[in-house]
Amino acid sequence: MEKLLAKELKKLTPERVETIYANMHAYAGKAENFAPEVRMALENLPQRFSSLIEKLSWNDVRFISDLPGKNTARRRLDGGGESTAVLARCCRGHRRALPSSLPIW
C-alpha cells in the first residue's frame, strides 16, 4: 500500500495532516453531513435515552486501552495499537453489521 501511495505520502507535512484532521472534525460537526436517519436518531436521543438505558445489557466485556504516545508517526495518518487490533478482530467476518456497538473514548 505504501508503494502505491508513496507520492501522496511525500506531500503529507505535519501542517497538511493537521489541516486534514481539522477538516474532518469540521465535517463531522455539521449535522447536514449526516444521513437523514442519523440526524433523526440524534435528535430523538434525549427522549429515548431512559428507554435505551433500561434495555442495555453487558456480556463478554473487555476494556482495552493503548499506551500514551503509541503513534510516533506524525507525518502519516496511520498507526494503531492494542485498541486497533482488538477492533479489527471484532470486525473480521462481519459483512453486514457488528453484533454490538463499540464505544471509543
Image (spheres, grey):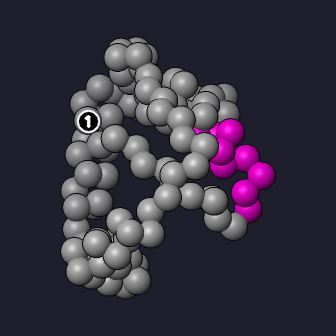
- Residue 81 against residue 29 in the figure, above or below: above
Residue 98 in the image, given as x and y percentages of width and height:
63, 59
Specify few, some or many for label 1: CA neighbours under 10 Å numbering under 14, 14-19, or 20 or more. Answer: some
> In this image, 9 relative to 97: left or right?
left
Residue 10 in the image, given as x and y percentages of width and height:
46, 26
Residue 31 in the image, given as x and y percentages of width and height:
25, 73
Residue 5 can be seen, yes or no:
no
Quarter where residue 18 is shown: top left
- Residue at screen point 22% across, 61% down: 29
Residue 31 can be seen, yes or no:
yes
- Residue at screen point 33% across, 27% down: 13
Q: Classify the position of the N terminus by image quarter.
A: top right
- Residue 32 against residue 97 in the figure, above or below: below
Of residues 37 and 29, which is closer to you in this image?
A: 37
Q: Classify the position of the C terminus by image quarter.
A: top left
> Callout 1: helix, strand or loop?
helix
Q: Residue furthest front?
A: 54
Judging by the rendered image, the residue that carries numbered circle 1 is 18
Number of numbered tags placed on the structure image: 1
Q: Which residues are magenta?
A: 87-95
- Residue at screen point 44% across, 62% down: 56
Q: Decide whether residue 92 is among the magenta residues.
A: yes
> In this image, 32 relative to 68: left or right?
left
Quarter where residue 35 is shown: bottom left
Residue 43 in the image, given as x and y percentages of width and height:
24, 79
- Say which amino acid is labelled 1: Glu
- Residue 90 against residue 42 in the figure, above or below: above
- Residue at screen point 64% across, 64% down: 97
